[in-house]
Image (spheres, grey):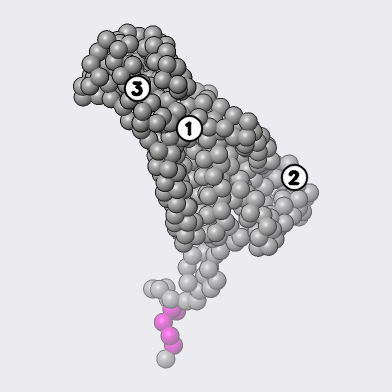
Amino acid sequence: MAGSGLATRLYRGEAGLDIIGKRKLWFGIAGALVLAALLSFLFRGFTLGIEFEGGNSFQVPASVGTLNQAEDRVDTVLAGAGSTEVESAQRVGGAGGEFYEFRTAVLSSEQANAVKSGLAQEFGINADQISSNQVSAAWGGQYTERALLGLVIFIALVMLYLIIRFEWRMAVGAVSSLLLNLILTAGVYSLVGFEVTPSTIIGFLTILGFALYDVVVVFDKVQENTRGITANNNQTYGEAANLAINQTLMRSINTGLVALLPVGGLLFIGVPLGAVTLEDLGLVLFVGMFIAVYSSIFFATPVLATLKDFEPRIQAHKKRVLARRGAIARGEVTPKGAPRAAAGGGESVVDPEAAALAGAVPKVGARPAAKRQTGARGGRPTGGGGNRPGGAKRR
């Protein structure tokens, strides 16, 4: 049927994907990806920009020729000044037009002046058309220190908020998801070899907010589905959490796509057309937002369900649910809504397999059933009353 396709079931929250039941698989995938990222940190490291490593930069007008030709001529001038070759070259735009920016290792004042004069002679332009700048590595260290301090404060505030809003297990699941996001995004950045610039740090801090939003949406649904979960024996905590993932899955996918489309346009279309200065920010945002959607579905909630399994109250509830399902499968218990025994003392007409299907696994969209209040009968107060004869008290 057309109405029962995957897209339709996703929108209705009825896809029935078993995310929690396969948590070991998702943990294994996450562990393998983290290991690959750590190996990349160890053997490849990061390509630090001039802001973090220190060095000199020179900007010459783009009218001197192509970027490759200009870089070769700059290398010649640097060799004559007793310096190393160009470490990075890119085309940048500004209010005064387009320029080529060449970054080198740290030069002394005499070397920097000699390189600037040599470039003016090499390109046949005035020396005032060439701008030079020197950045100390200490500035990058201070910038990194402030960024790490901001990260620690952010995580602490997130933990506090989630503990107050939900519980400490959800806080642990959310923060572990954020850390996974940071590690994997940094791993991709290390493998690609893009320069680490201040824009990169800003991008890392930005994706944390997006990842947190996605996790909170899922956890809010988990809390709704598991409220009063121990009051009935039809559904385990893991099944209720898995139902919450399915109910919010399409929302997570839509949010991720809406966020990734403009960032992907910047990275895959804008950068090849010349917006090179935005490639580092675009890569961080694209990879980080993609991993945020993945981690909120396949990591954060499975971590929560695993932590809840250690809670004695949840363990006892799970045993009751499984015991009831076993009794239903053996025909010892008649599930709610199943046919009763035949009239006249005949045998029960309950099929154990059908009963297990009817009462063992809750349907998508089911909620924990609340206890019926005592002292009520059929939703009406006990005892006489109303306008029926005999309802008045005898004198």
Q: Left or right: where does residue 118 sit relative to residue 184? A: left
Look at the image and tell me whether residue 37 can be seen: no
Disc 2 target residue: 352
Q: Where residue 320 sits: x, y (%)?
A: 70, 58
Disc 3 target residue: 114
The residue positioned farthest toward the front in the image shown: 110
Look at the image and tell me whether residue 395 can be seen: yes
Q: Left or right: where does residue 393 sit relative to residue 128? A: right
Real-space Cα distance between discs 1 and 3?
A: 26 Å
Q: Where residue 181 sits: x, y (%)?
A: 52, 39
The earlier-in-sequence mark between 3 and 2 is 3
Most prominent secondary structure in the magenta stretch?
Answer: loop
Residue 48 image label: 1
Q: Where residue 58 sits: x, y (%)?
A: 34, 23
Asked whether 382 or 393 is in front, the reply is 382
Residue 155 image label: none
Q: Which residues are magenta?
A: 390-394
Q: Residue type at mark 2? A: Pro
Asked whether the residues under the numbered discs 1 and 2 touch, taking CB atoms below 8 Å apart as contact, a structural biologist would say no
Crowd around label 1: few <14 · some 14–19 · many ≥20 (10 Å): some
Asked whether 1 or 246 is in front, the reply is 246
The earlier-in-sequence mark between 1 and 3 is 1
